[in-house]
Amino acid sequence: MCPGGYATLSEDAGFNRKEVRVRCLPPKDTADQAPSALSSTTAPGAPKSAESRLRDLQSLFDKGLITEQEYETRRHSIIGAL
């Protein structure tokens, strides 16, 4: 598992086989990112807001780390807890 996601280096298909070479990307440095207004008012270790959890979930889906079904299930769970 790569915390920063994957980058496709090459793809090759032959008789009865398909080869895909990927590279593990380094994790994104969160220290360089500006904190959101919501996270700056939240104490460290406090539960994340629904908005923050939905953003994180969308990010996982956009990176291809979860399926659409997992995305929808978790999204409904977050929204249902409001």
Image: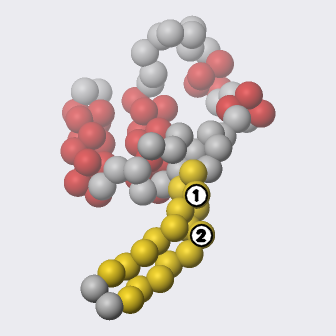
**Left or right of 74, for residue 7:** right
Q: Is residue 14 visible?
A: yes
Q: In terms of image quadrants, where is residue 39?
A: top right
Closer to the camera in the image, 43 or 63: 63
Instruction: Measuring from the top left, give residue 49's x and y in whole percent.
Output: 44, 24
Residue 51 seen in render: no
Q: Secondary structure at mark 2?
A: strand
At horizontal 48% and vertical 54% (from top left) the residue drawn is 63
> In the figure, residue 38 lies in which quadrant?
top right
Q: Residues within 10 Å of mark 2 (few under 14, many from 20)?
A: few
The residue that mark 2 highlights is 9
Query: Is disc 1 placed on a helix, strand or loop?
Result: strand
Answer whether labels 1 and 2 touch (C-beta < 8 Å).
Answer: yes
Residue at left 43%, top 75%? 19
Q: From what the image shows, is residue 30 above or below residue 42?
A: below
The residue under label 1 is: 23
